[in-house]
Image (spheres, rainbow, N blue to C red):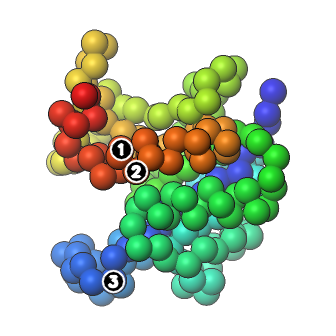
Amino acid sequence: MQERFDVFITAGYDPDKQDRVCAAAGVAHKSLVPVVEMPMAWHVVQALAESDRIGEVVIVGLEPGEIDFGVPVHHVPNQPSLWASQNAGLRKLRELNPDDRYVIALSADIALLTGQIVDSFIEACEPFEQDVYWGIVRKDVMLAAFPESRRTYLPLREGSFCSSDLYLGRLTAGFHIQERIRYFIENRKNVLALVW
């Protein structure tokens, strides 16, 4: 069974789009917004570094030197869309190691991520019998922890869930389902489109 997982983090942004949070924080894009005096993306990388199950880390959308992560990180330039960032992250992981394996994808704006959460997510996906795993959080759990959170919830038989912004999947599956990924990203705020 695979023990270590390479990761790509999407930290991209649209330079033409104004963001209120970024403007208030005086930073160029969301992954640089400080949380407890450090950029959000820094906290995500530190959570990954806390896990002994993480291998190579790729961050898409930040330039080398924008953040001192204190650990080795591969940088990929900003891309024109979230879908293009996902695709660039997959390509960089394949460039680093062409072998098919499970990899993790996540976003740079989950600053409260911890190494324990990363490890728990990986363990929940074991024994890795599917090609793709999507981390989800029950609505009641999310609202209990973050009552002001404005998440999009997907109704399922077991209840309503939102994305945890953690994904694990085979590298080859990521390339094979590119059009489905594009559709999902474009409709991530539209529950009806995701259900149908």
Numbered mark located on residue 184 in the image: 1
Q: Amino acid at mark 1?
A: Phe
Q: Which residue is mark 3?
A: 15
- The answer to whether residue 53 shows anywhere in this view is no
Tell me the residue at 31%/13% (across/down): 158
Tell me the residue at 69%/71% (across/down): 74
User: Dot 1, how many residues are within 10 Å of its Cα: few (below 14), some (14-19), or many (20+)?
Assistant: some
- The answer to whether residue 48 shows anywhere in this view is yes
Q: CA distance from mark 2 to mark 3?
A: 21 Å
Q: Earlier in the sequence, mark 2 or mark 3?
A: 3
Secondary structure beneath label 2: helix
User: Dot 3, how many residues are within 10 Å of its Cα: few (below 14), some (14-19), or many (20+)?
Assistant: few
Vertical side of 7 occupied by 164: above or below: above
Q: Which residue is mark 2?
A: 182
Tell me the residue at 22%/47% (across/down): 189
**Is 195 situated left or right of 83 in this image?**
left
Residue 111 horizontal/vertical position (percent): 44, 58
